[in-house]
Image: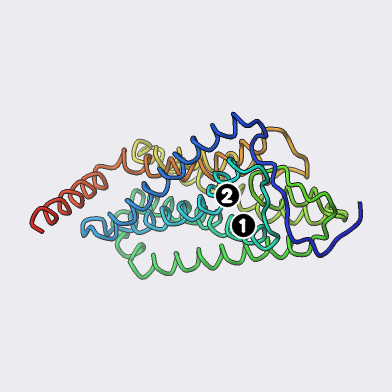
Amino acid sequence: MQQNNSVTEFALLGLTQDPLRQKIVFVIFLIFYMGTVVGNVLIIVTIKSSRTLGSPMYFFLFYLSFADSCFSTSTAPRLIVDALSEKKIISYNECMTQVFALHLFGCMEIFVLILMAVDHYVAICKPLRYPTIMSQQVCIILIVLAWIGSFIHSTAQIILALRLPFCGPYLIDHYCCDLQPLLKLACMDTYMINLLLVSNSGAICSSSFMILIISYIVILKRLSACTSHITVVILFFGPCIFIYTRPLTTFPMDKMVAVFYTIGTPFLNPLIYTLRNAEVKYAMRKLWHGKIISENKG
């Protein structure tokens, strides 16, 4: 193989090469993606329109739903289209953009989950000081810092990806572009880059997971109020830790594990946060009822 620093495109293998299974993948993930977008957009519109959902918890839920929609959009449309395509070609620029978006919105989701855990902790353990600690100004500052942190993380990832020299054939054994599958194509010793990857993405996943688990153990006496949050944490961080905290080795299950946190969790989040939340369900019914009345009057 000859080194080529001017690669213009890659080919993705996708989840499967079997024609029948590809059709099944198309149907299943089209449903998942549509459900993700509709569910999260419904939460965003409901929180933005409702006067009763003005607490910090719903402020952070708004940004979680936004991050979920964008996070899923960074991978799902490509997976769905490629399921019906004979050649799954992705340009170099699109591949690098996907790496950046995947880590930007994935990291943002991690930070928002931490902020929601902090909000729960303060509300339960320091109820008298809650209005002061979690004021609107503080919440806005925390969200801005979360965006800045996410941007720094994704910038670090894309810098690593852009410095990789690639060798043909340019065949990525995955359904999307990420650093791990790209490192397998690099014409260089990737030990140090993999170490940086583990210390960056792996450290963020592991440390955030530990912070979240400790925070929920502290408020264990109110576990029923936090069950939905713990479910999200386990579903999202379990696969992330499995992918990003190990040496550069690949397993056949890696692609399916990645599906859990890139597509599965964004789909489940709206269900988890609405089905167990009476306030959100009431606000949604009120919003929908109000639209029906306005349409009838029109």
Q: Which secondary structure lies at badge 1?
A: helix
Q: Nearer the viewer, residue 211 or 60?
A: 60
Q: Which mark is residue 219?
A: none
Q: Nearer the viewer, residue 141 or 88?
A: 88
Q: How many marks?
A: 2
Question: Relative to 136, is 98 on the left or the right?
Answer: right
Amino acid type of the residue tagged 2 in the rendering: Arg
Above/below status of 4 relative to 244: below
Please name the residue shown 22% across and 50% down the image. Answer: 283
Give the percent coordinates (x, y) of residue 245.
69, 45
Name which quarter of the figure residue 160 lies in: bottom right
Between disc 1 and disc 2, whose residue precedes?
A: 2
Q: Residues within 10 Å of mark 1 (few under 14, many from 20)?
A: many
In this view, the residue farthest toward the top is 20
Give the percent coordinates (x, y) of residue 57.
34, 54
Q: Are marks 1 and 2 in contact (CB under 8 Å)?
A: yes
Residue of label 1: 98
Question: Relative to 278, is 236 on the left or the right?
Answer: right
Please name the residue shown 83% across and 60% down the image. Answer: 165
Question: Relative to 277, is 76 on the left or the right?
Answer: right
Please name the residue shown 24% across and 60% down the image. Answer: 49
C-alpha span from label 1 to label 2: 10 Å
Which marked residue is nearer to the observer: mark 1 or mark 2?
Answer: 2
Quadrant containing the C terminus is: bottom left
Residue of label 2: 78
Give the percent coordinates (x, y) of residue 127.
30, 54
